Amino acid sequence: MPGESDSLIAMLDVATTALDGPMILTPRRFADTRGSFSEVWNARTMASVGLDFEFTQDNQSISAVAGTIRGLHYQAPPYAQGKLVRCAAGALCDIAVDVRKGSATYGQWTGVDLTAENGRQFWIPPGFLHGFVTRADQTVCLYKCTAVYNPEADGAVCWNDPDLMIDWGIKPDDAILSDRDAAAPKFADWCSPFTEEG
């Protein structure tokens, strides 16, 4: 007979990625003539699939124009952040890059398309660079973080670094960037503060 953990897992579709750690989580959606409902975060459900932690901060970004890039960002230990990212409006491609020293996939990336329609969420553990590119105007990105923002631990790496070979789906000249992201250091000139142990 199915137990409580089975019913919790049934509320959430979990898919792994090519990298160890990041996961695609799609909450079950209940639809009727009014629209739909889903649980986007449930501590018991997430713990049942191995994501047992406390979130301390929720963030929202609104990007006015398609082709906006935010990233690649990180927060160094001991303030490293895990992030659970979703799209509330519009569409984006969310990117994670493994920068854990000693990892077999160090410097490799994975990405997932997040839209309001597909309801996917992307879990990015500490030890990964994070960024996204918007695919539609007025895209709203929401993400929960496992640590609060600390400006002294904040950092960035060049979004279109040739060593990373990330397929953002846009030409570099078409990217809309902040001054900070445009000036971020190259991957080869950056020393990762992360290890596999944290």
Image (tube, rainbow, N blue to C red):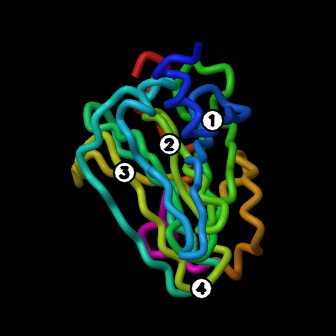
Q: Is 178 one of the magenta-colored residues?
A: yes
- Provide the residue designation for mark 4: 137
The reply to whether residue 192 is visible in this rendering is no
Mark 1 or mark 3: whose residue is earlier in sequence: 1
- Provide the residue designation for mark 3: 144
Mark 4 or mark 3: whose residue is earlier in sequence: 4
Mark 2 or mark 3: whose residue is earlier in sequence: 3
Mark 1 or mark 2: whose residue is earlier in sequence: 1
Viewport quadrant of the C terminus: top left
**Mark 1 residue type:** Val
Magenta segment range? 176-184
- Rendering quarter of residue 10: top right
**Mark 4 residue type:** Asp
- Provide the residue designation for mark 1: 14
The correct choice, above or below, for 31 with respect to 15 in the image is: below
The residue at 48%/73% (across/down) is 140
Element at badge 2? loop
Element at badge 3? strand
The numbered disc on residue 118 is none
The reply to whether residue 74 is visible in this rendering is yes
* Real-space CA distance between mark 1 and mark 2, rounded to the nearest whole angstrom: 33 Å
- Provide the residue designation for mark 2: 190
* Real-space CA distance between mark 2 and mark 3, rounded to the nearest whole angstrom: 26 Å
Mark 2 or mark 4: whose residue is earlier in sequence: 4
The answer to the question of whether label 4 and label 1 lie on touching residues, with beta carbons closer than 8 A, is no
